[in-house]
Amino acid sequence: MTNRSYDPLTKDNAAVILVDHQVNLMTGVRDYETGELKHNVVALARAAKALGLPIVATSTARDTLWGPTFPELVEALDGIEIIDRSTVNAYDDPRVAAAIEATGRKKLIFAGISLEVCAGFPAMTAVAKGHDAYIAVDASGTFSRTKHDVNLLRLQQAGVVLSDYATLMVEVLKDNGAPEAAAVYDALDMPWAKLVGQIVAAYAK
């Protein structure tokens, strides 16, 4: 039976978990263009900061396998520590798990490279621990269309909510009259929305 209840994301119940957006992993992504994926991840991080959401960021085997977090995201995180680990599942690292739990948030928004491992494994673990887990699919990436498609099915079967980065952040925003609304939309960097805003401003003169 379909669950028809709706408990929305808010500034008080949500946190963002960014997993393994690393240079060497980015080179293998095949379901998104590199520039688009970078844009989406940075926009998610910037919008989360504008909303005051806790952000936990992690990398894996930074110095031996997958390289550093890509520079544009490091800049967007603006000093937030990126916890480097060796475990495949980020939630298996005690420091990452402690950082997630320290947010005190029930609803966890994950994004990672790869979608099925770096985002998917900790998201499924979060569900098993009693959290509500979400994945921003377009701020994640993987290495083939098959991996993308079959693992979206697996994640849904495990109870993970799938969405896109902008919808998740706008859900948290909730009110277009909120003081942070302009900063959030600026962070989301949606060209069509900027165009609409320019047209409205022109007509208002």
Image (spheres, helix red, strand yellow):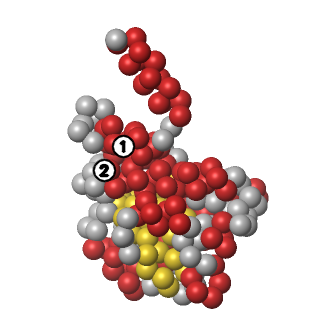
Q: Is residue 94 visible?
A: yes
Relative to 105, does residue 8 appear above or below in the rendering?
Answer: above
Kindly state the secondary structure of the residue where label 1 is placed: helix
Badge 2 or badge 1: first in the primary sequence: 2
Task: Indicate whether 194 appears above or below 138.
Answer: above
Residue occupying the point 33% across, 37% down: 182
Tag 2 residue: 51
Q: Nearer the viewer, residue 162 or 27?
A: 27
Q: Residues within 10 Å of mark 1 (few under 14, many from 20)?
A: many
Vertical comparison of 49 with 186: above or below: below
Say the numbered circle drawn on residue 184: 1
Q: Element at badge 2?
A: loop
Relative to 89, 55 lies left or right? left
> Could you tell me which residue is drawn at 47 percent across and 30 percent down?
194
User: x and y percent of residue 44 in the render?
Assistant: 45, 53
Mark number for residue 6?
none
Residues at discs 2 and 1 in contact (Cβ within 8 Å):
yes
**135 sits to left or right of 55:** right
Residue 82 lies, in percent from the top left, at 43, 75
Residue shown at 61% from the left, 78% from the top: 67
Q: Position of residue 94 (x, y in %)?
A: 39, 86
Quarter that holds the C terminus: top left
Q: Viewer-proximal residue, 119 or 21?
A: 21
Which of 140 and 79 lies nearest the eye of the viewer? 79
Residue type (three-letter) at the residue carrying disc 1: Val
Question: Distance between the Cα atoms at labels 2 and 1?
Answer: 7 Å
Q: Is disc 2 surrounded by few (<14), some (14 to 19) or many (20+) residues within 10 Å?
A: many
Residue at the image point whose x is 74% and y is 58% from the top: 30
Indicate the quadrant where residue 48 lies: bottom left
Which residue type carries mark 2? Answer: Leu
